[in-house]
Amino acid sequence: MTRMMHQTAYWPILVVAAAFALLPLGLTSTALLNFLSFAMIIALAAQGWNVIGGFGGQFSFGHAAFFGTGAYAMALLQVRFGVNPWLALPLATVLGGCAGCIIGYLSFRARLRGSYFALVTLAFAEVLRILANAWSFTGAAAGVLVPLRLDPVHMQFSDRRAFYWLALLLVAIVLGASRFILRSRFGAQLIAIRENEDAARALGVDTLVVKLKALAISAAITATAGALYTQKFLYLDASLAYGSWISVDALLAPIIGGLGTVFGPLVGTLVLLGLGEITKILFAQITGGALPGVDLVAFGVLLILCVAFAPRGVMGLAARTLIKPRRATS
Amino acid sequence: MSSPLLSVQNITKQFGGLTAVDAVSLDAEAGRITGLIGPNGAGKTTLFAVISGFETPTSGAIQFAGRDITKMRVHERAHAGIARTFQIVQPFAGLSVRDNIAVGAYLRHRKRDAALAKAESVAHAVGLAPLLDQAAWSLTVAGRKRLELARALATEPRLLLLDEVLAGLNPSEIRDMLPVIQSICASGVTVLMIEHVMQAVMSLCDALIVLSQGRIIASGAPAGVARDPRVIEAYLGHGASERMQALASEGPHA
């Protein structure tokens, strides 16, 4: 019986992944495929954030630090060291995890919680952005260009769908990993820390180690998203890699989708980016011109609505509307 | 007599200029229920915080099962076998009762199935079984107190520190809780409890320690301690003991 329960827990993930995998077979629009590929990258970054922010309750405002580290690692390993991207990708993941360990150790050791932790992570991301912008090794303000070599050996595909499937595969793996964490001892301890850190300590949870592990995993996932970003656009500069835009996206998506849920980051990303695109298109049609940042205005409105009316995000809203009728009849 | 499971040796805890606990030494004998009583602000909870590792003592040492644990961190003490409840209950509010208790059970059971099974059996032991799937925030005060107890028990402690688990309960709820605490002790767990409900203290405890203004003013068998003039004065004020004796010598009132 328990064996069956273990399996059923992963069913929805397989179904969702399969549905997303089949999507490009019916759709031929390049714009839509680009949108989906980009959404998968952001979803992956958001999934990473969700591990420390959603499960662990430690709100990072600076996941750009990890996204950028992964992105630069991917670019520089290829350009400066001639490493094959298929090897550079896992290396970027590991380097991101290391960055998470360092930043985590420095801030958790100092017992920073809540807004103090948020501010410190923001500061780390900004420091890295300024460094990357100044250092010649990272290409300074000019950025890094990864040479175009359209060959699967170099993780560059002439068929755009291949990249989408690669990104989707990673998102699906992290969906599974998130479910696994939620059902593990580590996950239970991490959630206990989110709910009440002192009570968790009293029950024998080594809060420093658990938070460090969580941030390392979180950072590694977000760094992988950064590496994919490099490989998709083949160009990087400091404000793309370490810019606050990705910190904001990685944080907003899980909040809007459903904090600490398995599917929240993915759902939130699609809502967030979808709304952003629609806003930009509508604004362009109505005024006849583009206004950079108009999508951020929509994000802000969405966040306020979410906090006010759906504090548990889209996933919470869905659960509520699905369960309500049953309660009414009972 | 065998050596005590817990031995607090000359513990002093100062917060700035305030001495909350002043050179306190006490023992908790294995397999017994020891009560720690005293007026508000006597330093009982601070002493608990020092024993469980949430506060480091200004001076003094703590021995547990023959080991010096004075420098151990909170979670290491939990591993060693010390569990505590909080006077102000600290549930994992968003989680179910089952998941709350499971966090404690995970200390000694790494597998999810084992931890959940342990959580269920502890819930049965403390009378929370019907509420296993309820969210912790939806529990009554009595339920939350039981949850505190259950979570601590799930860590399979050798020493259980109970900080006013009966406070805020009505008389019938207290009556329900007494056998639970007795059965915990009967199962081999040593209990050190802070309690204000005297009826419970007198019926439960094998030994009593009275703390007042950070110092131990009396200790021993419950009946003797309750008659101790210093204890009566600590609770009721200077001269209270004499007045009570005077009243008692006038003969029993109808």
Image: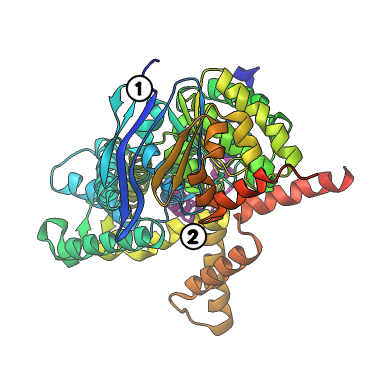
Residue under label 2, please give it: A252
For marks 2 and 1, give the CA distance.
50 Å
For the question of whether residue A303 can be seen, the reply is yes
Classify B147 as above or below A108: above
**What is the magenta segment's predominant secondary structure?**
helix
Which residue extends farthest right?
Answer: A329
Q: Residue at x 81, y 44 (%)?
A: B254
Looking at the rendered structure, the kind of residue marked 1 is Ala
Q: Position of residue A245 (x, y in %)?
A: 38, 64
- Chain of the residue under the numbered disc 2 shown in the image: A
Residue under label 1, please give it: B65
- Chain of the residue under the numbered disc 1 shown in the image: B
Nearer to me, A161 or A74: A74
Stretch of the chain drawn in magenta: A20-44
Classify B1 as above or below A52: above
Q: Residue at x 45, y 21 (%)?
A: B30
Image check: B115 left or right of A316?
A: left
Q: Position of residue B41 (x, y in %)?
A: 47, 54
Nearer to me, A181 or A231: A181
For the question of whether residue A267 can be seen, the reply is no
Image check: A223 left or right of B115?
A: left
Q: Residue at x 40, y 15 (%)?
A: B1
Label 2 close to label 1 by CB (< 8 Å): no
